Amino acid sequence: MEEQMDITQDFDEVIDETKNYINSKLGSKAKIIHGECIEELRNMEDNSVDLVIIDPPYFVPAQHYATRKAFKRNFGDLGVMEFFFKEVFKQLTRVLKPTGCLYVFCDGQSYPIFYYHLYQYCKSVRPLIWNKKTSINGYHWRHQHELVIFAQMPENVKVPTGDGDILDYRAVKVNDRVHPAEKPVDLLKRFIEKSSKEGDVVLDCFAGSGSLGDACKELNRDFILIEKELDYFKTIEKKFAVEKEGEE
């Protein structure tokens, strides 16, 4: 038992040392973190982030009715998801500066829950439409778009623009994806350019394969990426470690 504990402790120390090394390479405000999003957000300081862009697992309801006995679906199935995101948005709006804003990918089923929990913290919560231009064959009406919530904090300044709220960007091709929900870097760059300036800190607490980091590096923004799944965290870690090694 003691030997097993020593091995586990040694492994944890290696992970911590690796994270410290990568983060030292990335810079003082560009960080990658392996951990659960709420736990890690609670460790962050108030008003420490300029912009939040997240693509959470936005529709994973309880499946207690998926048994041999037939149960009707009801809104109570969403209770677990609602409880989780209530705390996520509470923490995100705490770490976000009063001048900041959030972009949250979602769909028609999760939008009402996200809107409800952001409304109390933000002066404006509205949907943008990401038009992927093509759909995949199936039945009835096929998905060709995703919703993106654009939520402004109380002191977020108005940005003069003629840009519409329908954004035309093709999705990442399935065979090119590292993560099943990977978003196109050009779309992320559009949000970053619209709602931040060089040197600002951008946060993604559902980092996936780290596409937000790619977009931030191209636009000279600092970033904080939090990812729970170890395999994806290692992908992010390797990506930015290799890039930094090559730049020196």
Image (spheres, grey):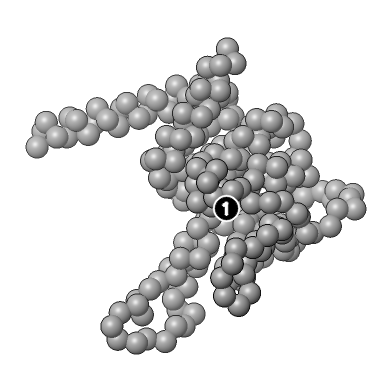
Residue nearest the observer in this picture, 178 or 31 = 178
Q: Which quadrant is the N terminus positioned in?
A: top left
- Residue found 90% across the figure and 49% down from its top: 160
As drawn, the residue found furthest toward the left would be 1
**Residue at 39%, 40% in the rendered image:** 231
Compared with 169, 73 (above or below) is below
- Does 236 sit left or right of 27 as displayed? left
Q: Which of 208 and 43 is in front in this view?
A: 208
The location of residue 199, given as percent across then percent down, is: 71, 30
Question: In the depicted view, which residue is nearer to us: 94 or 7?
Answer: 7
Location of residue 145 in the rendering, given as x and y in whole percent from the top left corner: 67, 62
Identity of the residue drawn at 54% across and 39% down: 210
Q: Name the amino acid type tagged 1.
A: Asp
Q: Mark 1 points at which residue?
A: 55
Crowding near the residue tagged with mark 1, few <14, some 14–19, many ≥20 C-alpha atoms within 10 Å: some
The C terminus, quarter of image: top right
Q: Which image quarter: residue 10?
A: top left
Would residue 47 be visible to someone looking at this image? no
Tally of marks = 1
180 vs 145, left or right, is: left
Question: Which residue shows up at 59% across the image and 67% down it?
Answer: 137
Q: Which of 243 and 226 is in front in this view?
A: 243
Q: x%, y% of residue 172?
A: 61, 48
Q: Is mark 1 on a helix, strand or loop?
A: loop
